[in-house]
């Protein structure tokens, strides 16, 4: 009986981290996604760094649009009250300049609006991921005049690191203890007072708004040992932003929180799928580093765009390259993240150009990229419903040359090419594929039928630079692809996200913490 009571929280938590593996996440800048009044088409120029008027209600009213692309989670901007001033860097429309940890950002709506959004998501079995910042707060003052008195609860200078700027980014002490910018007073995350406040705060925030997961900002600017207790206190999954070019640096943080964004991958994906052809081999090499350096590659956040980087179509207008990058993001090991506007082929380059209001697109569900994402992501959901092993098994490299990368994962083979839309038509002869010989296979991009030969050998037709996505034909029923029926009424996709799987180490560790708490309680 006691044992059962002890096991319960452990299992509940195991579901929390594991259930994110099967999700796909749509990143939203709350201020830029949708206004409460859809008739309000007042222009808003991202270069001015002002509030454009997007709200939680706006998101709530466009959930069909998001779910129509197969996404099963959204990540929204930080929700806490920010400094109201226009600074030399513009307004805090992005939410990263905290003023009061215990109040909401009224620009985005009321408490009821946020609660309604969460409830509407839950009804659709979609998750809510909220962005949080711990490293710094916001200030409109000249740095040396900052006193903290406007900030709740860190109102004393002793709650902050002394003013210094990071001038040597290889010096980790500076990265952690100096200020990222004049606008961002650096909280003293070594102070016991600060630590206690943050740990209590995050637990309350998650409970108050029924948050399913956290995206944590500027993780590398806080000492690693801060994070485990913070994440434990939240009780939910967390993925951290660790901006770095090598998996070695980034994945070190996966020892302190369940997941990090795969920034090293991002840079190589950007470079791999370009016209004229970029480097596939850098991408392939990096995958080995991932396996060597990361505790759990299946939880890493994969992305080709986010709010801090130039949009991908700013570098390539070739739709075939974009289709290959989408395919990698969705089917490779890890959790796929898309940034609002990718589905509308937005082309804004560096921040702030890449933070366009979405309403100028009229939320078209017929734009080529919307259709592409919807098709591929719905297919991913279908695959997971067929076999949850898809998100718990590692992909393997089947074939690689200067322009091609073939990866096999569970029962899916996907072949990426960077030859571009004007690339040649040819047959790629694979001597093995991962499929047992004799398997009937459908290539779902062009709907070609194939049969795997000896050792799974396959001859795959490549053309117009499109990716090739191959799956056993008998598993396609219900996918709606290539003449197979759609799932109607028997939607197994929905259960995919909450299936329990064996505990991974992180979950176990989280669980153990709660065991300790429970024992103390007893
Ligand atoms: C706010 O500041 C930005 C940059 O300093 C400037 O471009 C913008 O016009 C200002 N907005 C208002 C409303 O004052
Ligand atoms: C790193 O920066 C800190 C603070 O500026 C300084 O005290 C320390 O000497 C630096 N370490 C190295 C190895 O440069
Ligand atoms: C920057 O910091 C690194 C690591 O602390 C150190 O090795 C290097 O010498 C520093 N560079 C400069 C220019 O101070
Ligand atoms: C959570 O809600 C309680 C009760 O309304 C409130 O006192 C507390 O400040 C809230 N905490 C956070 C972090 O939102
Ligand atoms: C991969 O590992 C090699 C060897 O340690 C290293 O030189 C390279 O920078 C790493 N690349 C990435 C992207 O981590
Ligand atoms: C990874 O980083 C650690 C320290 O952060 C270093 O000791 C190790 O040599 C690095 N490994 C590689 C392969 O670069
Ligand atoms: C993409 O474009 C940005 C500027 O918009 C540039 O900084 C970056 O290097 C480009 N990336 C590649 C891979 O060409
Ligand atoms: C995206 O827009 C560019 C022009 O900026 C166009 O050439 C390209 O075909 C578009 N791609 C898609 C997938 O819509
Ligand atoms: C959105 O709709 C408006 C009004 O009908 C139209 O003027 C505009 O061209 C549309 N934008 C796009 C991207 O389709
Ligand atoms: C692949 O690229 C390398 C370096 O760019 C080149 O030397 C080699 O010939 C290429 N291989 C093929 C098969 O094109
Ligand atoms: C499946 O549904 C999609 C979208 O609702 C539709 O476009 C497609 O034609 C359907 N396919 C079949 C085989 O019914
Ligand atoms: C759903 O599945 C049940 C049991 O497998 C079956 O009897 C029923 O006909 C299915 N409904 C639809 C709409 O496919």
Image (cartoon, helix red, strand yellow):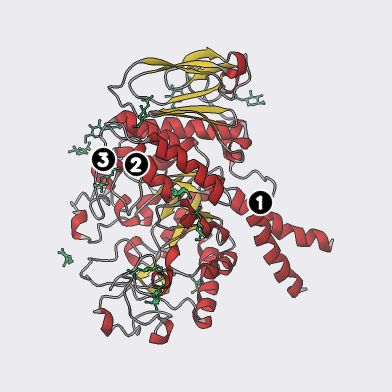
Which numbered marker is on residue 504? 1
Task: Name which of mark 3 and mark 1 comes first in the sequence.
Answer: 3
Disc 2 target residue: 270
Task: Establish whether ligand 7 lies closer than 8 Å to the Cβ of label 2.
Answer: yes
For the question of whether residue 394 can be seen, the reply is: yes
Task: Establish whether ligand 7 lies closer than 8 Å to the Cβ of label 3.
Answer: yes
Q: Residue furthest right?
A: 1
Q: Could you give the CA–CA distance between mark 3 and mark 1, rounded to whole angstroms?
A: 38 Å
How many discs mark residues in the rendered view?
3
Disc 3 target residue: 315
Crowdedness near tag 1: few (<14), some (14–19) or many (≥20) residues, C-alpha within 10 Å: few
Q: Position of residue 74 (x, y in %)?
A: 44, 49
Q: Could you give the CA–CA distance between mark 1 and mark 2, rounded to whole angstroms?
A: 31 Å
Task: Name which of mark 1 and mark 2 comes first in the sequence.
Answer: 2
**Between residues 465 and 8, which one lies in front from this camera angle?**
465
For the question of whether residue 34 can be seen, the reply is: no
Q: Is the C-beta separation of discs 3 and 1 under 8 Å?
A: no
Crowdedness near tag 2: few (<14), some (14–19) or many (≥20) residues, C-alpha within 10 Å: many
Helix, strand or loop for disc 2: helix
Q: Quadrant of the N terminus?
A: bottom right
Task: Name which of mark 3 and mark 2 comes first in the sequence.
Answer: 2
């Amino acid at each position: 009986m006691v044992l059962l009571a002890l096991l319960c929280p452990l299992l509940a938590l195991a579901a929390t981290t594991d259930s994110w593996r099967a999700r796909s996440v749509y990143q939203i800048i709350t201020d830029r996604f949708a206004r409460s009044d859809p008739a309000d088409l007042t222009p808003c120029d991202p270069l001015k760094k002002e509030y454009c008027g997007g709200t939680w209600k706006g998101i709530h009213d466009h959930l069909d649009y998001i779910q129509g692309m197969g996404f099963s989670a959204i990540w929204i901007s930080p929700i806490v009250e920010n400094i109201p001033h226009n600074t030399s860097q513009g307004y805090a429309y992005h939410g990263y300049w905290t003023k009061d940890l215990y109040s909401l950002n009224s620009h985005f709506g009321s408490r009821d609006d946020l609660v309604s959004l969460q409830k509407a998501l839950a009804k659709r079995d979609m998750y809510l991921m909220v962005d949080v910042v711990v490293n710094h707060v916001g200030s409109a003052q000249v740095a040396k005049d900052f006193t903290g008195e406007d900030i709740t609860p860190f109102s004393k200078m002793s709650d902050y690191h002394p003013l210094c700027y990071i001038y040597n980014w290889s010096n980790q002490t500076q990265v952690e203890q100096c200020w990222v910018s004049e606008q961002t007073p650096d909280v003293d995350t070594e102070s016991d007072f600060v630590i206690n406040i943050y740990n209590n705060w995050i637990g309350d925030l998650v409970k108050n708004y029924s948050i399913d997961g956290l995206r944590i900002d500027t993780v590398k600017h806080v000492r690693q040992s801060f994070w485990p207790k913070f994440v434990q206190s939240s009780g939910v999954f967390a993925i951290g932003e660790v901006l770095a070019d090598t998996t070695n640096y980034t994945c070190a943080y996966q020892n302190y929180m369940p997941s990090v964004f795969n920034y090293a991958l991002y840079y190589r994906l950007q470079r791999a799928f370009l016209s004229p052809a970029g480097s596939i081999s850098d991408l392939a090499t990096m995958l080995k580093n991932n396996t060597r350096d990361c505790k759990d590659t299946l939880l890493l956040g994969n992305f080709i765009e986010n709010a801090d980087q130039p949009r991908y179509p700013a570098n390539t207008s070739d739709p075939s390259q974009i289709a290959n990058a989408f395919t990698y993001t969705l089917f490779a090991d890890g959790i796929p993240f898309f940034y609002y506007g990718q589905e509308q082929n937005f082309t804004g380059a560096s921040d702030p150009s890449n933070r366009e209001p979405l309403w100028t697109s009229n939320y078209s569900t017929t734009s080529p990229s919307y259709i592409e994402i919807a098709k591929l992501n719905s297919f991913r959901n279908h695959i997971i419903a067929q076999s949850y092993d898809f998100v718990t098994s590692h992909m393997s490299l089947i074939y690689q040359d200067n322009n091609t990368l073939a990866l096999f994962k569970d029962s899916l083979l996907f072949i990426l090419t960077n030859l571009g839309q004007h690339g040649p038509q040819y047959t790629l002869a694979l001597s093995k594929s991962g499929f047992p010989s004799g398997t009937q296979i459908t290539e779902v991009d062009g709907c070609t039928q194939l049969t795997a030969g000896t050792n799974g050998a396959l001859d795959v037709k490549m053309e117009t630079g499109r990716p090739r996505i191959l799956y056993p034909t008998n598993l396609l029923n219900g996918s709606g692809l290539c003449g197979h029926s759609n799932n109607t009424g028997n939607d197994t996709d929905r259960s995919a996200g909450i299936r329990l799987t064996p505990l991974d180490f992180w979950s176990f560790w989280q669980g153990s913490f709660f065991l300790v708490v429970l024992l103390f309680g007893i």
